[in-house]
Structures are given as structure tokens and as C-alpha cells.
Image (cartoon, rainbow, N blue to C red):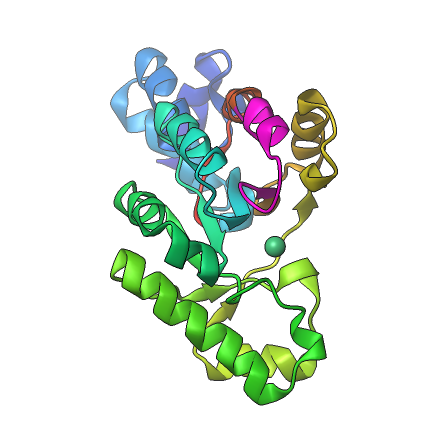
Amino acid sequence: MLALLMTLAMLVPGATAVPPGPAALTGASRRAVIPAPVTAAPVTTAPATAAARKTIALTFDDGPHPRYTPQVLNLLRKYHVKATFCIVGDNAARYPALVRRIRAEGHRLCNHTRNHANMTRLSNSAARKQITTAQRQIRAAAGVSPTVFRFPYGASNARVRAVVRDCGLRNLRWTVDTKDWERPAARTITARVLRGARPGAVVLMHDGGGNRSRTVASLDSTIRQLKHKGYTFVLG
Ligand SMILES: [Zn+2]
């Protein structure tokens, strides 16, 4: 059977060159040129691990912000992309409708402390309070509690990571820092994402905490180019 599949695949130009990518992007073209039994061949002969699939997670920190978060959400909706929003609790309390919208549109909520604290400078009890207060603020706005947490400034140590674990939350790291908070040109933000893009990448951007107009301006091109490269978007 395998030999037959390989023979058939060789008869179809380009068939074996199709990567085991997301079905939504490659399935249609495969179906168009290959008889049904052969469509399974590239999938069964290639590793189906998560690392081999071209997935990427977009994450937006420090919001929600009444100006930028809706623009980010509109772009994500335009391209049917789901992302993760690392919410500052006090912002959730100020803009609960935005937190509800993030949740309602299928994105993931992430705890980013009550007021963007550097957790390494806090006692265990103060660090825990940052987390539990933000959990309460986000739950009050969206009706659900986050299951992931991201350290402000990426500042962590074993002690405060244990506090996060004790609160039942998973520590969400990133692999691509766009440094969008430095307000580089939009095309620079896009270039940084594309340069760091690889299967399993987690991209750090910001929808709050300052002027994020360049992040918003970069996003359309970033998403289009990632999709063109065959990436699908997963939650962080
Ligand atoms: Zn932050």
C-alpha cells in the first residue's frame, strides 16, 4: 500500500513537496490534483508532531486599551485569527466590555498581574495578591478566569514562578520579542515577527501601555505574510 501511494505521489508533480501543513491551507490544493486515497500519503509519512506543523501564537500585552484593542480585534477578526491577550487587571476593571469582547471573539485571556508589577521585587504574599486580584478583575469582566500568566517585563525567578504555579496558572513565555513598545516603524515590527517565525513560535506584541498605533499598523501585513508562509495561528 505504501509503495502504491509513493508511486502515485511521484506521478503527481509537486505532490510530495506539499508540507504536512494545516489542512485549511494545503488540503484544497491537494484535493484538486490528487485522487482521494493519495491525499493521506504526505501526512502518514511525515512526523505529525506539533513542532513539525507551522503554528504560531500571537500575544498582545498590557491592554485592554480603548483605542488600540478594538483595532487589533478587528484585524484578527478580518483574518479569522485567534490570539492571546495578557490583561492588566486594573485595565480589565476600567474596560470590562473590551475584556468581554476579547473573550466573546474566541481569544485567550492571560493574567498579566493587577498593575504590571515586577514580581521579582515582591514578597510571596504580595506576588500572590497581584495574581489573585487580576484573576478576580478579569473574571468580573469576562465571566471566566485565565489559566495562563505572563510576567511583566519577563521578570521572573524560581521563587515567583512557584507562586504562579501554586495559583494554578501556566507561565506563558515568548520566543519573538518585537520590541514594539519602542515604537519602531510598522514594517520593522512585521520584519521582526517574520524573522523569528518558526513552528511553535510565540510572538510578543502590545495592545496597551502606551501608543500602539505602529503595532496596529504592522498587524495586517504580519498576518498576511505569515499566512502566505503557511502558518496557522494558535493560542499561547
Ligand atoms: Zn507587560
Above or below, 183 relative to 97: above
Above or below, 213 relative to 90: above
Task: Find out whether residue 215 is within the magenta segment.
Answer: yes
Q: How many marks?
A: 0
Q: Residue at x 62, y 68 (%)?
A: 117
Above or below, 92 relative to 45: below
Choose between 123 and 1: the one closer to the eye.
123
Q: Position of residue 10 (x, y in %)?
A: 48, 18
Left or right, 2 with reference to 144: right
| Residue 45 in sight from this viewpoint | yes
Magenta residues, start to end: 205-219
Q: Residue at x 63, y 61 (%)?
A: 152
Q: Residue at x 50, y 46 (%)?
A: 47
Q: Position of residue 12 (x, y in %)?
A: 44, 13
| Residue 178 in sight from this viewpoint | no
Q: Position of residue 198 (x, y in %)?
A: 63, 39
Quadrant of the rendered structure where residue 195 is?
top right
Q: Position of residue 162 (x, y in %)?
A: 58, 83
Task: Find out whether residue 64 is within the magenta segment.
Answer: no
Instruction: For ligand 1, give the image quadrant.
Output: bottom right
Q: Classify the position of the N terminus by image quarter.
A: top left
Quadrant of the rendered structure where residue 92 is?
bottom left
Q: Residue at x 33, y 19 (%)?
A: 28
Choose between 19 and 102: the one closer to the eye.
102
Left or right, 233 with reference to 122: left
